Amino acid sequence: MNAGDEAVTDKRALRAALRERRAAHLAALPPAIRALTFGIAPGPLAALMRRARTVAAYVPLGDEADPLRLLAQATAMGCNTALPHIVSRADPVRFIAWRPGSLLVVGPLGLRQPDAAGREVAPDLILTPLVGFDRALNRLGQGAGHYDRAFAANPRALRIGVAWAAQEADSLPRETWDMPLDAVLTEREWIAGPRAEGAGA
Ligand SMILES: Nc1nc2c(c(=O)[nH]1)N(C=O)[C@@H](CNc1ccc(C(=O)N[C@@H](CCC(=O)O)C(=O)O)cc1)CN2
Ligand SMILES: Nc1ncnc2c1ncn2[C@@H]1O[C@H](COP(=O)(O)OP(=O)(O)OP(=O)(O)O)[C@@H](O)[C@H]1O
């Protein structure tokens, strides 16, 4: 096994451990609390959304934090809204215009996505799913590189992770292609980097 293979194995093990920790965290959380979490954007995120033209979120898979009420808040602020769409692991993500409450279609990996025929848009704020994050705002995703590629294609868009606090790792491996998040929102705190700092102050 060469060094590259070892790194891949490490990331797989990290993903498995982080998913397990997230599941345990949620199992211990009263359902009513879980249902209320991520309902309203805290001030700094609301300020960033107010300045955005197009905000993208995602439909949660499994135990992922649910950003759809934050997306509804963006709509109420006058933003356009969008969701990611994939056709396979290998193909890049496209963001497609979608209004909260409108039609979703089941796609690959059980993802609920907007209809592929919808209008493609370039979001300027991306509420991003993740498997793990760290204090340096590194992100670990599903491993298909969908968001890494989307970030590279649109580097000016703000990259805001949405996650349960239990998804924090001490330190994640940083790859040459990784672009750090600008902030992470958890049920406990707003962790902001330079491009998101000062918002709402
Ligand atoms: N909710 C959501 N939508 C998303 C993503 C995501 O991470 N979460 N994506 C992010 O790139 C893109 C889809 N890419 C994906 C790539 C791989 C897997 C995947 O391998 N999933 C695991 C199970 C994960 C789980 O249960 O949490 C699997 O199928 O084994 C999922 C999505 C766009 N939409
Ligand atoms: N900008 C890019 N252009 C092309 N391929 C990329 C780019 N960024 C990453 N990749 C590829 O995507 C694959 C997955 O990367 P990685 O394991 O870091 O994903 P991840 O951190 O889990 O995040 P994601 O949610 O984006 O899948 C790697 O094989 C990498 O080569």
Image (cartoon, rainbow, N blue to C red):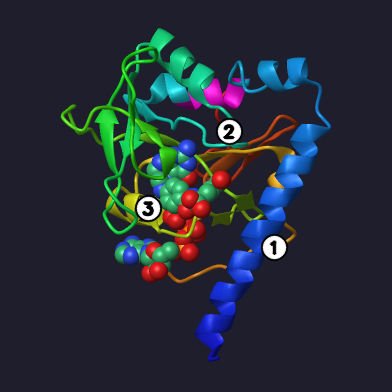
Residue at 71% over, 43% down: 22
User: Label 1, label 2: how many angstroms apart (C-alpha)?
Assistant: 25 Å
Q: Quick one: label 1 or label 2, which is nearer the N terminus?
A: 1
- SS for callout 2: loop
Residue 141 visible somewhere in the drawing: no
**Tag count in the figure?**
3
Compared across the picture, whether 63 is left or right of 157 comes to right
Dot 1: within a 10 Å radius of its alpha carbon, few (fewer than 14), some, or many (20 or more) residues? some
Compared across the picture, whether 183 is left or right of 82 comes to right
Q: Position of residue 149 (x, y in %)?
A: 34, 56
Amino acid type at mark 1: Ser
Residue bearing the label numbered 2 = 198
Displayed-image quarter of ligand 2? bottom left
Residue at 71% over, 58% down: 17
Q: Which mark is residue 20?
A: none
Residue bearing the label numbered 3 = 146
Circle nearer the viewer, 1 or 3:
3
Is label 2's Cβ within 8 Å of ligand 2?
no
Compared across the picture, whether 84 is left or right of 72 comes to left
Residue 170, magenta (yes or no): no
Q: Please, is residue 25 above or below residue 174 in the view?
A: above
Residue bearing the label numbered 1 = 171
Dot 3: within a 10 Å radius of its alpha carbon, few (fewer than 14), some, or many (20 or more) residues? many
Q: Position of residue 108 (x, y in %)?
A: 35, 43
Residue 197 visible somewhere in the drawing: yes
